[in-house]
Image (cartoon, coloured by chain):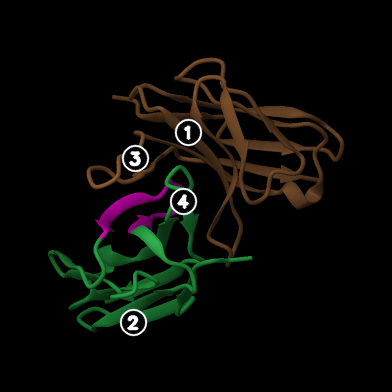
Chain colours: A green, B brown
Amino acid sequence: TQLLEQSPQFLSIQEGENLTVYCNSSSVFSSLQWYRQEPGEGPVLLVTVVTGGEVKKLKRLTFQFGDARKDSSLHITAAQPGDTGLYLCAGAVSGTASKLTFGTGTRLQVTL
Amino acid sequence: NAGVTQTPKFQVLKTGQSMTLQCAQDMNHEYMSWYRQDPGMGLRLIHYSVGAGITDQGEVPNGYNVSRSTTEDFPLRLLSAAPSQTSVYFCASSLRPVSGIRTNIQYFGAGTRLSVL
C-alpha cells in the first residue's frame, strides 16, 4: 500500500514554463520532505516542512505543506533544464519518525 | 568526506545465488535504512536500524536480512536471489530525529543496480 501518491507521474515541459507537482495522502504526517534524484545518483534533500500551511521557497522552487498535513505541493517557476530529474516527496507519519514513506515520484524533463 | 558508500555499484546474479550489499557511512549517524527503487513505485523501505544491534522490518522485508554490528556498517543480505529482486538498492543514513528540532533527513548512497537472471 502506497501511502503517498504523487501526480503527475511524468512531466515534459519547455524551458521557461511553470509547473506544479502534488503529493497526496490520507495519512497525517509530522513532517514532509522533498528530494530530487538525478540519473545514477541517490536522492538529495531539497526541503523539509513541518507545520501545516507552511510555505518554503528555494530560489524558483516553492514548497507548501497542506493545512491538515496530509498533502504537499512543489511549484517550479520558469523551469530550466537543470531542474530535470525525479522529484520524490517523503513523509514521517506521526509516532514513527524512524521510518520515512516515499511517494511514487514525478519524473520531470525540461527541454530547451 | 565520503558520506554513504555502497558497494558494489552493479551486480548480476543467477536465481538462487546469495550475496551481500555493503553500506558504510562516516557521519556517525544513528539511523540507517535500505530501500529498493522500482519504476513508478518510488522508494520502498526494506529494513532499517535505529542503532547498533537494533534492526526492524520495513514495507518489503521478505527475502532480505540485515544486521547492524557497528554504527558505520549496515549490510543487506539476499539469501536466495529471485528475479523479483531485480532493482536499484539504496542505503541511507540519518541523525536521530528530535521532535521540534530535527527531522529524519536521509543521506543516500549512489545505489547498487542488481539484476537477477
Give the CA separation, mark 4 to mark 3: 11 Å
Residue B14 sits above or below residue B60 on the image: above
Q: Which chain carries label 4?
A: A
Q: Residue A13 carries which label?
A: 2
Q: Residue A100 carries which label?
A: 4
Residue at horizontal 23 percent and vertical 74 percent from the top: A76
Q: Mark 3 points at which residue?
A: B97
Q: From this viewpoint, which residue is outermost toward the front?
A: A95
The reply to whether dot 3 and dot 1 touch (C-beta < 8 Å) is: no
Where in the figure is residue A43, as x and y percent of width and height? 40, 50
The type of residue carrying mark 2 is: Ile
Residue at horizontal 36 percent and vertical 34 percent from the top: B96
Q: Could you classify mark 2 by the number of other residues whose Cα lies within 10 Å: few (under 14), some (14-19), or many (20 or more)?
A: some
Magenta-colored span: A32-50
The type of residue carrying mark 4 is: Leu
Give the CA separation, mark 3 to mark 2: 37 Å
The reply to whether dot 3 and dot 2 touch (C-beta < 8 Å) is: no
